[in-house]
Protein backbone atom coordinates (compact mmCIF):
# COMPACT_ATOMS: atom_id res chain seq x y z
CA UNK A 1 0.00 0.00 0.00
CA UNK A 2 1.31 3.45 -0.88
CA UNK A 3 0.73 6.07 1.79
CA UNK A 4 0.15 9.41 0.11
CA UNK A 5 -0.03 11.59 3.23
CA UNK A 6 0.59 11.41 6.95
CA UNK A 7 -0.68 13.88 9.54
CA UNK A 8 0.30 14.37 13.17
CA UNK A 9 -3.19 15.35 14.30
CA UNK A 10 -6.72 14.03 13.81
CA UNK A 11 -8.40 17.16 12.44
CA UNK A 12 -6.38 17.34 9.20
CA UNK A 13 -7.17 13.66 8.57
CA UNK A 14 -10.89 14.26 9.05
CA UNK A 15 -10.80 17.35 6.81
CA UNK A 16 -8.92 15.51 4.05
CA UNK A 17 -11.36 12.60 4.12
CA UNK A 18 -14.35 14.97 4.19
CA UNK A 19 -12.95 16.66 1.05
CA UNK A 20 -12.78 13.31 -0.72
CA UNK A 21 -9.00 12.92 -0.75
CA UNK A 22 -9.23 9.28 0.31
CA UNK A 23 -9.75 7.26 3.47
CA UNK A 24 -8.30 7.41 6.98
CA UNK A 25 -7.93 5.36 10.13
CA UNK A 26 -8.89 7.02 13.43
CA UNK A 27 -10.08 6.20 16.91
CA UNK A 28 -13.85 6.26 17.43
CA UNK A 29 -13.44 8.93 20.10
CA UNK A 30 -12.35 11.57 17.61
CA UNK A 31 -15.19 10.77 15.18
CA UNK A 32 -18.24 11.27 17.40
CA UNK A 33 -19.39 14.56 15.84
CA UNK A 34 -18.78 13.51 12.23
CA UNK A 35 -20.56 10.19 12.67
CA UNK A 36 -23.51 11.88 14.41
CA UNK A 37 -23.98 14.45 11.63
CA UNK A 38 -23.15 11.84 8.94
CA UNK A 39 -20.41 13.84 7.24
CA UNK A 40 -18.21 10.73 7.43
CA UNK A 41 -18.97 7.00 7.28
CA UNK A 42 -17.16 4.51 9.49
CA UNK A 43 -16.18 0.88 9.28
CA UNK A 44 -15.19 -0.69 12.59
CA UNK A 45 -11.85 -2.48 12.42
CA UNK A 46 -11.37 -5.46 14.74
CA UNK A 47 -8.72 -4.90 17.45
CA UNK A 48 -5.60 -7.01 17.10
CA UNK A 49 -2.52 -7.71 19.19
CA UNK A 50 -0.68 -4.96 17.32
CA UNK A 51 -3.55 -2.48 17.55
CA UNK A 52 -5.50 -3.22 20.76
CA UNK A 53 -7.71 -0.10 20.62
CA UNK A 54 -10.86 0.12 18.52
CA UNK A 55 -10.37 2.09 15.32
CA UNK A 56 -12.71 3.03 12.48
CA UNK A 57 -12.00 3.42 8.79
CA UNK A 58 -13.67 6.58 7.53
CA UNK A 59 -14.68 7.95 4.16
CA UNK A 60 -16.69 10.89 2.91
CA UNK A 61 -20.46 10.35 3.16
CA UNK A 62 -22.18 9.45 -0.15
CA UNK A 63 -19.12 9.88 -2.34
CA UNK A 64 -16.81 7.85 -4.54
CA UNK A 65 -13.22 7.29 -3.53
CA UNK A 66 -10.22 6.53 -5.74
CA UNK A 67 -10.01 2.92 -6.99
CA UNK A 68 -6.99 2.07 -4.81
CA UNK A 69 -8.74 3.40 -1.71
CA UNK A 70 -11.90 1.50 -2.69
CA UNK A 71 -9.89 -1.75 -2.99
CA UNK A 72 -8.37 -1.17 0.44
CA UNK A 73 -11.82 -0.37 1.88
CA UNK A 74 -13.18 -3.63 0.43
CA UNK A 75 -10.26 -5.59 1.91
CA UNK A 76 -11.04 -4.12 5.32
CA UNK A 77 -14.72 -5.02 4.93
CA UNK A 78 -13.76 -8.60 4.12
CA UNK A 79 -11.72 -8.83 7.34
CA UNK A 80 -14.52 -7.71 9.64
Image: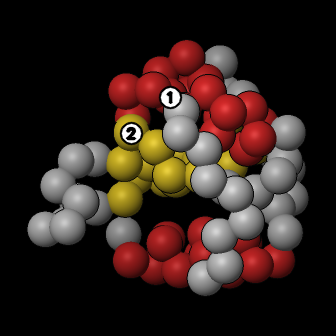
Instruction: Specify whether residue 43 is in view.
Output: yes
Would residue 47 be found to the left or right of residue 71 on screen? left
Percent x, y of residue 27: 39, 39
Image quarter in which the N terminus is found: bottom right
Q: Is residue 73 above or below residue 37?
A: below
Q: Residue at x 76, y 57 (%)?
A: 22
Residue linked to disc 2: 27
Spatial CA span between label 1 and label 2:
7 Å
Q: In the rendered image, which residue does mark 1 sit on?
A: 31
Q: Of helix, strand and loop, which one carries label 2? A: strand
Up/down of 55 relative to 12, above or below: below
Left or right of 76 on screen, residue 11: right
Callout 1: 10 Å neighbours few (<14), some, many (20+)? many
Residue 50 - label: none
Residue furthest left as drawn = 49
Do residues under tags 1 and 2 come within 8 Å of each other at their CB atoms? yes
Relative image position of residue 63 (x, y in whole percent): 85, 50
Q: Quadrant of residue 34?
A: top right
Q: Position of residue 49 (x, y in %)?
A: 13, 68
71 lies above or below 56: below
Amino acid sequence: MDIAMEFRHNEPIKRAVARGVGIGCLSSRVLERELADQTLNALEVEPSARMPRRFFMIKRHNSRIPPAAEAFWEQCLAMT
